[in-house]
Amino acid sequence: MFARIWSTLFGSAPVAIPSNVTMALLDAALFTPERIEGLRLAKAPGKFAGRSVTKFRIFDPATTSIEVKRFKDLQFPAEILVTGRLESNDRVYLD
């Protein structure tokens, strides 16, 4: 219960990039597959046009000057490579 509340308030711990987000990044020609392997994704619940979505921020832990433990740790544009959202049907939208 506490973990769910924490995740709702601050977002979850960074994870490897999921396959549906990887495909969106490759389709947009933003990164090579090798580059994506080293990146991480931090996510948090959010709203878009009145719908519940999952917001995400992608970053490179090798070049980030801060220790990222959750979504809200990534506040500065220089630390964030890509932002986007996941809809409830797992469709990915890149900003």
Image (spheres, helix red, strand yellow):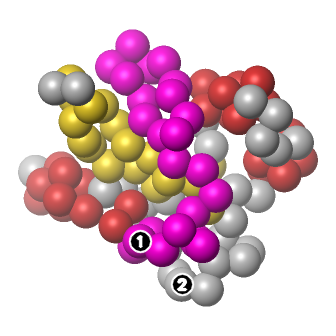
Q: Residue at x 38, y 43 (%)?
A: 55
Q: Pointers 1 and 2 in contact (CB under 8 A)? A: no
- In this rendering, the answer to whether 81 lies above or below 73 is above
Image-quadrant location for residue 27: top right
Q: Position of residue 39 (x, y in %)?
A: 69, 56
Residue that badge 2 annotates: 66
Whether residue 53 is situated above or below residue 88 in the rendered picture: below
Label 1, on which residue? 75
Across and down, in percent, residue 12 comes to 35, 56
Q: Which residues are magenta?
A: 73-95
Please state which amino acid type lies under the numbered disc 1: Gln
Q: Determine if residue 47 is in view.
A: yes
Q: Position of residue 34 (x, y in %)?
A: 89, 47
Few, some or many residues within 10 Å of mark 2 (<14, 14–19, 20+) = few
Measuring 26% from the left and 31% from the top, which residue is drawn there? 48
Q: Give, as a three-letter code, the residue at label 2.
A: Ile
Q: Is residue 19 visible?
A: no
Dot 1 falls on a residue whose secondary structure is: loop
**Residue 15 or 53: which is nearer the viewer?**
53
